[in-house]
Each structure stands twice: as structure tokens, then as C-alpha cells.
Image: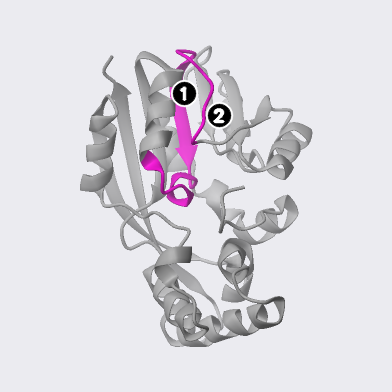
Amino acid sequence: MIKGQPDWNPEGYREHAGFVAELGEPVVQWLAPRAGERILDLGCGDGALSARLAATGCELVATDANPAFVTAARRTHGLDARVMDARALTFEGRFDAVFSNAVLHWIPAAERVIEGVARALVPGGRFVGELGGSGNCRSIVDALRVAVEGYGLDWKAIDPWYFPTPEAYAALLEQGGFRVEEMASIPRPTALPGDITDWLQTFATGIAAYLPAGQRAALFADVREALRDSLCDRQGRWTVDYVRLRFRAFKTG
């Protein structure tokens, strides 16, 4: 578990963040998996999207740093899922493609991830993924920053997210031995299935964990109130200001 990240719970994630896998189909299309290909899914979560890849007939290996997610991926979808940190991949020249959806923005050590991906790919192999890009969830990030600083915390020290610009991430890929074929920043306002508090309790518990237990609910209540006018409509429906960074790159060596 990376410090500051939520303590992911497969059941709660499925209930409050199932849209993450549901909205992952466009990046699967960019991957265009083919039967017989060897594909590594980097950060498989509960395996919902991984199962769609496996259904294409590819030879899929799914990894996640969270043992509970890996167990769920095995039990629910019958996947070859393994506990592994994306910053310390152990594969050598094994895969035709590496796929990742909604994971890389949780790992500021982007260079280490890219290095491991390049090592895992065969020459000419492709790296296709989507992560939060610059401006992702800006309203929530700003509200959280103001709230935690009000509790005396240093936001820069506890911010768990990495939301790069297209230019910055393309430069890292090129430095890591990739040729970037396509990169797009995609605004994607996303309606939530429930209240913004459910989103915070799913994605921001790692931030709240820096506070004493008795203050965590108050932190989320403060953030909810700060966001009500901008993200909640008159019917009480919440929409998050997502911005996705989608890319396809090929290993040059």
C-alpha cells in the first residue's frame, strides 16, 4: 500500500466507484487487444475491466498492489492476478502490451513505473493507458487542500495524486524509451451514483488518515459543503470534474 492512499475495499469500491471500469472502454479500444497476445494489466482493481480484456482471448496477467483487490479478481473473474507494486515490476521482455486504467495518477514515481513497463515489454510492445490528467477533479482537490490546511496539515506533503500535463507525461515516456503515438487530454464530467461523501470515503480516506479519527468525518463534511454549489445540482445529483489523460506509446528498443 502506497502511503496516503485509501485502504481499498472491493465491495465499497464496486458500489461507489463502479463507473471507473464502466468508463474504461475507450482506453480498451485504444489498446485493441488481440487473441493470443500477452498483456499485462497494471493495477487491475477488482478485475472488472481486466475480465473484458481476457474475454478477447489474450493471455492476461493482472497485477495490483492491494491484496484484497487481487483476491477479488481471482475469485470473481478467475483471473491470473498477482500482488505487485507498479513501481517494482519483475517481468522481463514478457508482454506484447501493458494496459493501465485509472491507476497511474496514484503513483507519483512515474519514472519508476515507466522503467518497469519498458522492461516488461518485448521490443515494439505498446503501453496504453489512461490516468487523471492536469485539472482532474480540480474542484475536489482545491476543497480538500483548503480543508486540510484548516486543520494545520501541509497539503503538499500529503497530496496523494499525480495529474500530469500531456507534455510532461509524453516527455517521461520518451525519456523511458517509448515513442508516443497518441496522447489526449479529455474532459469527462462524471455523474456519481450517490453523494460526494461516498466519493470522498472511497478515494480520500488516505488523506483523512492524517487526522485523528474523531476529525475525519468533519473534514469530509467541510469539503462537501464547499463543493455543494459547484458540483451538486438542484435535484441533489453530484457530478465530478474529471479530466482524463489517455495515451498509446510503443517501446523503441
The residue nearer to you, when weighing 27 against 168, is 168
The residue under label 1 is 33
The correct choice, above or below, for 125 with respect to 78 in the image is above
Name the outermost residue toward the right: 75
**Residue 76 in picture, x, y percent from top left:** 76, 37
Q: CA distance from mark 2 to mark 1?
A: 7 Å
Judge the density around disc 2: few (<14), some (14-19), many (≥20) Cα neighbours within 10 Å.
Answer: many
Mark 2 or mark 1: name the one nearer the start of the chain: 1
Res. 34 visible in picture: yes
Q: Residue at x 40, y 66 (%)?
A: 156
Residue 32 place in picture, x, y as percent: 42, 26
The residue at the point 44 percent across, 78 percent down is: 143
For the C terminus, the image quarter is: top left
Q: Residues within 10 Å of mark 1 (few under 14, many from 20)?
A: many
Task: Say which residue appears at 69% left-offset and 27% top-offset.
Answer: 79
Count numbered badges in the picture. Answer: 2
Q: Is residue 126 above or below residue 248?
A: above
Which numbered circle lies on residue 111? none
Residue under pointer 2: 53
Q: Secondary structure at mark 1?
A: loop
Residue type, label 1: Pro
Percent position (x, y) of residue 24?
A: 49, 44
Question: Any magenta on residue 98?
Answer: yes
Comparing 28 with 206, the one in front is 206
Instruction: Give 63 or 85, whichever is nearer the viewer.
Output: 85
In the image, the segment drawn in magenta is 87-110
Q: Secondary structure at mark 2?
A: helix
Q: Given contact means CB atoms under 8 Å apart, are the residues at marks 2 and 1 in contact? A: yes
